[in-house]
Image (cartoon, grey):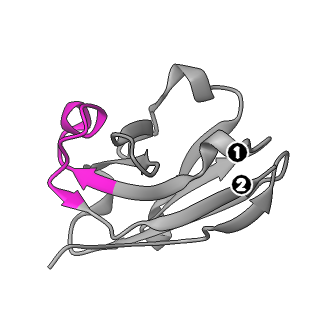
């Protein structure tokens, strides 16, 4: 059974930083792609960034480049999202996703999704 468990969300002041984690199980981590997505109240889900775990290639949402970094620890089956210079508009529930195809992850159609971790950025 595939499981994706996010953690690290919480309340942070604008300008602060957070690192989200997603621990994966039930699939061959090195052979998959994963991504982070977010959904703010009343808005559609949007991509934050994706990573091909086999070679570390990353894809970032253009508007977030420079403030976020995706990384992975393949030995720990864990995906990370480092977010810096947080803004109130970053407030959302953040989800990690996984699929065998990087294209599918980037497109937001991953087969597997976590339950999400909420992030609130206060002004």
Q: CA distance from mark 1 to mark 2?
A: 5 Å
* Quarter of the N terminus within the rendering: bottom left
Residue 103 painted magenta: yes
Q: Nearer the viewer, residue 27 or 89?
A: 89
* Residue 19 image position (x, y, % from top left): 67, 60
**Residue linked to disc 1:** 88
Q: Nearer the viewer, residue 106 or 72?
A: 106
Identify the element where label 2 is drawn: strand
* Residue 47 image position (x, y, % from top left): 40, 37
On the rendered structure, is 92 left or right of 84? left
* Residue 29 image position (x, y, % from top left): 31, 61
Identify the element where label 1 is drawn: helix
Q: Tell me where residue 97 sits by quadrant.
A: bottom left
Q: Is residue 16 visible?
A: yes
Mark sitting on residue 16: none
* Residue 4 image position (x, y, % from top left): 33, 70
Q: Residue at x 22, y 30 (%)?
A: 103
Q: Nearer the viewer, residue 85 or 21?
A: 85
Dot 1: few (<14), some (14–19), or many (≥20) neighbours within 10 Å?
some
Q: Residue at x 60, y 61 (%)?
A: 119
Q: Is residue 55 visible?
A: no
**Residue linked to disc 2:** 121
Eyeballing the image, is 84 above or below 8?
above
Residue that protrudes farthest toward the bottom in the picture: 1
Range drawn in magenta: 97-112
């Amino acid at each position: 059974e595939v499981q994706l468990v996010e953690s690290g969300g919480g309340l942070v002041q604008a300008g602060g930083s957070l690192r989200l984690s997603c621990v994966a199980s039930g699939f061959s981590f090195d052979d998959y792609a994963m991504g982070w997505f977010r959904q703010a109240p009343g808005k559609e889900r949007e991509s934050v960034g994706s990573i091909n775990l086999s070679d570390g290639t990353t894809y970032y949402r253009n508007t977030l480049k420079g403030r976020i970094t995706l990384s992975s620890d393949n030995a720990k089956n864990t995906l990370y999202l480092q977010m810096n210079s947080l803004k109130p508009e970053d407030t959302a529930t953040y989800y990690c996703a996984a699929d065998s195809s990087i294209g599918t992850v980037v497109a937001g159609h991953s087969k597997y999704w976590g339950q999400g971790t909420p992030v609130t950025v206060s002004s």
